[in-house]
Image (tube, grey):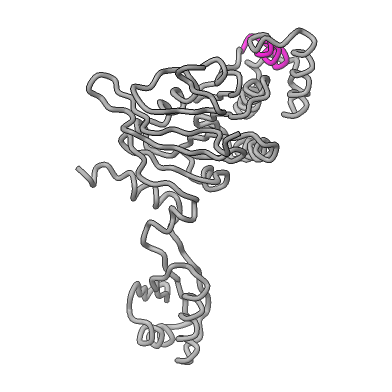
Amino acid sequence: MTDYAITARGLTKSYGDHVVLDGIDLSVPRGTVFSLLGPNGAGKTTTVQILSTLIGANGGALRVAGHDPVTDPQAVRAAIGVTGQFSAVDDLLTGTENLRLMADLRHLDRAAGRRRAAELVERFDLGAVAEKTAATYSGGLRRRLDLAMSLVGDPEVIFLDEPTTGLDPRSRRGLWQIIRDLVAGGVTIFLTTQYLEEADELADRIAVLDGGRLVAEGTAEELKRLVPGGHVELRFADGHTLDLAAKTLGDTGRDEESLTLRVPADGGVQSLKSLLDRLEAAAVPVASLAVRTPDLDDVFLALTDQEARR
């Protein structure tokens, strides 16, 4: 069995003269969260649709859960679950009825379908609302039911296309925990999101898609190191001490009003220690300090600045 749940080599997709995906390569290890980031129109949803057999690619070699979506789409569909941007929940059915309907679509027999629905109601803490129609559910409950429905077939791989859009912070964090629990159980998650904090919290690896091409890939920390701008912010008790610090370290980033100096640094322990040693040697006391490093917002803006490249 391959160590990768998803692989793509040279994946392309065009609509007429409009190129949506321009030869992207992906490798997603089993039992991990892989997050695909990018601005609107970058090709994230198209990638999910191709990998989940909803549409075909124009070119490239693919494997999902060990199967080729082109030559064996049924095997791929049997091995995956999909939660799209828009809920697949039927508002006229109860939570339990939605789950049983999905079991029927998965061709589970009646007894097995009822057991699976009951298991998922308990697993997703839907017992209090399971017999109520989905039209009465909050956004967070609908998303939990939607994700539960994608698990009826016990998939190896789950595609989550912007699953927490529109959720309040509490509901979003509740869904994050469900995702972590799924991965701990061996499920592979392919996540697209507009919430960079979400990718930072959940993803083992992150790829940034822009204009149909992958412009970067790595862990969150690796991507953050691609962007300059890390610094240590030093605050001093008075203007005299600030002057002494500036003579020792230079005037870079000096702010008279807040009595601070911003000194470029990579955020590492050794560079911070070296900085403090210099101040101690010069007998300059520091009132407080803060280490500032680029976050995924900075990475996203730097790597997907289409206007700057035109």
What is the x, y in percent for residue 159?
Answer: 54, 29
Please give the name of the residue rendered at 74% of the width and 13% of the height, measured from the top-left corner: 113
How many marks are shown on the rendered structure?
A: 0
Quarter where residue 211 is shown: top left
Left or right of residue 179, residue 129 in this image = right
Foreground residue among 234 and 232: 232
Quadrant where the C terminus is found in the figure? top left
What is the x, y in percent for residue 204?
Answer: 55, 46
Foreground residue among 274 and 237: 274
Please give the name of the residue rendered at 60% of the width and 18% of the height, measured from the top-left corner: 78
Quarter where residue 251 is shown: bottom left
Quadrant where the N terminus is found in the figure? top right
What is the x, y in percent for residue 224?
Answer: 44, 55
Q: Is residue 97 magenta?
A: yes
What is the x, y in percent for residue 149?
Answer: 65, 20
Left or right of residue 279, residue 243 in this image = left
Q: Is residue 300 magenta?
A: no
Left or right of residue 28, residue 185 in this image = right
Foreground residue among 157 and 152: 157
Per the rendered image, the range of residues in magenta is: 91-103
Foreground residue among 35 and 261: 35
Q: Residue furthest left?
A: 310
Please give the name of the residue rendered at 45% of the width and 50% of the height, measured from the top-left corner: 296
Q: Is residue 107 above or below residue 261?
A: above
Magenta segment, prevailing SS (helix, strand or loop):
helix
Q: Is residue 277 above or below residue 19?
A: below
Q: Residue furthest front?
A: 1
